Amino acid sequence: MEKDTRTHTQKEVSKQNHKICNKRFDISESQAALNFYEENGFVIVKNFYLTEDLQDFKLEVKNIVNSYLLKSGIQEMDSTNDNVLSGGILALEEKDHDYVAAIYDTISQSPSFFRILGNRNTESYIKKLLHIDTSHPLYGFTNRCRIDPPKDNRRTYGWHQEVFYTIPRGSYIQTWAPLIFDTTYENGTIEVAVGSHKEKIASQTWNESEGRATQILVDEKIVSKYEQRIVEMKVGEILFFSGFLAHRSGNNTSQQVRYSLVGMYHDVKHKPFFTPKIEFTFRKSSPKEYFEEVFNTLNNSIKQL
């Protein structure tokens, strides 16, 4: 696990070197929000999600974590408080990271997460930002709930665009939102280079290293041309941003696991778009292995009669 070794003073200096983005829009301020997006490459909308949907999601995540605690042989934790949301994940990380990876995949297919993704406001907002007709269908790509434990930077990203992390040549908008806890500089909220979307496809390098997520990094000289801002957000808010906007994950130096929605929506009518194949890999038995197990056992039982 790669740890953040900066001192408290160094972290405070780093935060002071970046400005906090405080501009928010109501859902009703669509034209003002669109103008802000066009100029800056991103926009934050407040009071976007239903409180009921967020509460349902939080409870379901607690239940999912407890389910995998039981599978791992660890005792369930009290779901009436929030300790399981961080303590449960950290206990499973210590036991075996694959349990946390399984939680990540389980959450992405959970009913409460689908209700958040299915928010009608998301669809209408995306279409306005893309300047497309309401008849254009959208395709959600890699919509997930990130789980970022404290002081674990293996899956954080430096300054990058999403251009080479998604369906090539697409026309799309990205989304990012806190789902359980507010996101802050301390727990590694997203940071943006304001206006950098105007570069279109910026100069960048493809970097792979063992134990780390692939890093496709924008040239630092380009990033330095733009004001960098920390996007601290409240639960219920959402960030929409351009696929060309340079952004990065922060380092979670808090004691709390960060849960955040990440994903994007492509315009299906955009000529180069063609949906990728979705493939599943089974962690335990595959359907064929299960079939063989059942019928080999059955056939062996018949032979013994």
Image (cartoon, grey):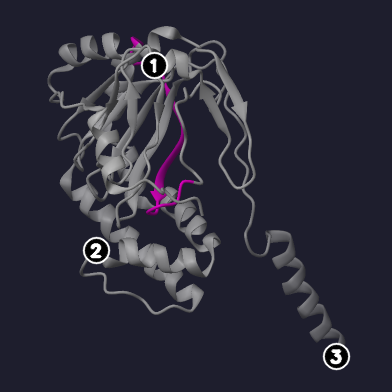
Callout 3: 10 Å neighbours few (<14), some, many (20+)? few
Identify residue type, mark 2: Asp
Vertical comparison of 297 with 89: above or below: below
Q: Secondary structure at mark 2?
A: loop
Gap between marks 1 and 3, in whole Å? 75 Å
- Left or right of 291 in this view: 254: left
Please tell me which residue is depicted at 74% across the width and 72% down the height of the picture.
293
Task: Provide residue 96's location: percent of width, then percent of height.
Answer: 54, 66
Q: Position of residue 43 (x, y in %)?
A: 25, 21
Q: Is residue 140 above or below residue 72?
A: above
Q: Quadrant of residue 143?
A: top left
In this rendering, the label closer to the viewer, 2 or 3: 2
Instruction: Indicate the amino acid at tag 3.
Output: Gln
In the picture provided, is 1 more to the left or to the right than 147?
right
Report, in whole angstroms, how far the alpha carbon at label 2 lies from the one at label 3.
Answer: 54 Å
Amino acid under disc 1: Ser
Residue located 54% across and 13% down the image: 203
Residue at image mark 1: 224
What mark, if any, has residue 82 been given in the picture?
2
Q: Is residue 222 above or below residue 13?
A: above
Q: Position of residue 173 (x, y in %)?
A: 39, 22
Q: Secondary structure at mark 3?
A: loop
Q: Could you tell which of marks 2 and 3 lies nearer the N-terminus?
A: 2
Question: Disc 3 designates what residue?
Answer: 304
Tell me, yes or no, whether the highlighted magenta stretch contains residue 150: yes
**Would you identify the image quadrant in which residue 89 lies?**
bottom left
